[in-house]
Amino acid sequence: MSAHRFPPIQTPRLTLRPATRDDAAPLAALMTPAISARLAAWPLPWTAARMEARIAEWRSLGLACTVLRSADATLVGWVHALRKRADPARATMGWWCAEPHQGQGFIREAATALLPVAFARLGVATVEAAAQPDNHASLAVMRALGMHPAGERLDHAPARNRRERVLLHEVHAP
């Protein structure tokens, strides 16, 4: 079974499932300036066509998932784990939560559920994540995942067409 084909992942409140082209328009509609400001590779305007291309590309690299509230199937966000092209023993994780659903712990719950699947399906030794130094919510998710600081670097942020300082965190396979 390929990495991106897996059964939905259930948590107490959420369902994570592989993103499909049918998710493109609903996901794109949730991308706001406040969310894009925290993401390096999600420039505005974020369209359904861009989202469809992102889903196809990222599914080829790993796990690209919608995050749904199980009780009513409301789309609350996105989480992914992608094998790094330059180092296939490593994957990178990322996430975002729609503004109306922020502050409820959904992304922490989703990322925690996806991490062991990422290790198992992608066969990587290390999973990393990066966030802007003042992105306290994402840094808290990284700590909840058991990630440890792994330095900082300047990354190109195509969303703003500039280099930005990010803090790196990583965790090794159990």
Image: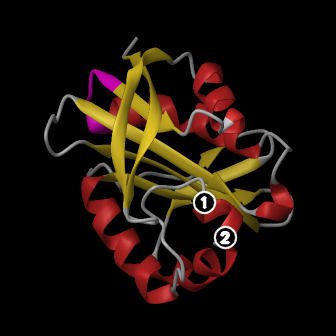
Q: Is residue 8 left or right of residue 33?
A: left
Q: How many marks?
A: 2
| Image quadrant in which you'd find residue 64 | bottom left
Q: Tell me if residue 140 comes above or below residue 47 in the rendering.
A: above
Q: Which residue position holds label 2?
A: 33
Q: Tell me if residue 137 comes above or below residue 46 in the rendering.
A: above
Q: Which residue position holds label 1?
A: 37
- Kindly state the secondary structure of the residue where label 1 is placed: loop
| Image quadrant in which you'd find residue 72 | bottom right
Q: What is the magenta segment's predominant secondary structure?
A: loop
**Is residue 123 in the magenta section?**
yes
Where is residue 63? Give x, y as percent: 40, 51
Residue 111 seen in this snapshot: yes
Q: Which residues are magenta?
A: 122-126
Foreground pick, 167 / 108: 167
Q: Residue at x 19, y 28 (%)?
A: 89
Cβ–Cβ under 8 Å for marks 2 and 1: yes
Residue 108 seen in this snapshot: no
Q: Is residue 155 left or right of residue 129?
A: left
